[in-house]
Each structure stands twice: as C-alpha cells, then as structure tokens.
Image (cartoon, rainbow, N blue to C red):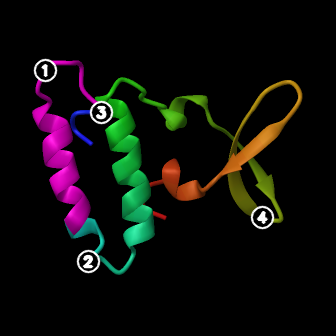
C-alpha cells in the first residue's frame, strides 16, 4: 500500500506510520468512526485534504442540525461527527 501511495523511489514515513495505526483501530469499540477519520487522514497525507468543515453548510431539520455539501442541482448530507468531532 505504501508503494502505491508514494512517488517512485520516495519513502513516505507518514503513510507507513498511518498504516501501522490502522491495526489498532480495529480493536476499538467504535472502530467504524475511527476508520473514517483514518481514511480522511490518509487522503490528506497523499494530497487530497477535503476540509469538510470549510465547505459544509448546515440546516436544522426536525430540531436537529444537519450538515451537507451541495451544488446547484443536489445536496449530499454528511454525518455530523465529520464536522462536530465530539458527536
């Protein structure tokens, strides 16, 4: 995986360490949430930082705050914990 995610003949210690962290994530009760954060960190390391907190908008539906990203034609809701990490 490290080889696939790095430029030829370059090392990427951050990717290597992050892959090591992956194994400990699966021992956590709430591993799915942690795995999503792990994927976002991997994307950031290889140059695709989504910065959802900067592009997401919010609205209140049935007294609940919902986050979404959208275009002129559609709206995609995203889990609140991706913006409010304490949820």
Q: Which residue is mark 2?
A: 27
Q: Which comes sooner in the sequence, label 1 or label 3?
A: 3
Q: Earlier in the sequence, mark 4 or mark 3?
A: 3
Task: Judge whether 9 appears above or below 63 on screen.
Answer: above
- Per the image, is 57 magenta? no
**Which label belongs to residue 63?**
4
Tell me the crowding category of disc 3: few under 14, some 14 to 19, or many 20 or more residues within 10 angstroms, Cα based. Answer: few
Residue at 33%, 42% in the rendered image: 41
Q: Position of residue 48 (x, y in %)?
A: 42, 27
Query: Left or right of 57: which side holds 84?
Result: left
Q: Measure how far apart labels 4 and 1 are at the Cα level.
A: 50 Å
Residue 55 % position (x, y) = 60, 29
Query: Label 3, label 2: how many angstroms apart (C-alpha)?
Result: 26 Å
Q: Label 3, on which residue?
A: 4
Element assignment for label 3:
loop
For label 4, the SS is loop
Identified at 79% across, 26% down, the residue is 71
Circle 1: is it few (<14), some (14-19), or many (20+) Cα within 10 Å?
A: few
Give the CA distance from mark 2 to mark 1: 31 Å
Using residue 11 as the reference point, say whether residue 51 is left or right of it: right
The residue wearing badge 1 is 10
Residues tagged 3 and 2 counted as in contact (Cβ below 8 A): no
Question: Which portion, as a residue range, is magenta?
Answer: 4-23
């Amino acid at each position: 995986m490290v080889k696939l995610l790095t430029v030829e003949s370059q090392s990427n210690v951050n990717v290597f360490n992050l892959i090591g962290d992956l194994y400990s994530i699966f021992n956590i009760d709430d591993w799915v949430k942690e795995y999503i954060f792990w994927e976002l960190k991997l994307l950031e390391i290889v140059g695709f930082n989504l910065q959802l907190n900067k592009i997401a908008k919010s609205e209140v539906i049935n007294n609940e705050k919902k986050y979404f990203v959208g275009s002129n034609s559609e709206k995609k809701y995203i889990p609140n914990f991706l913006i409010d990490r304490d949820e």
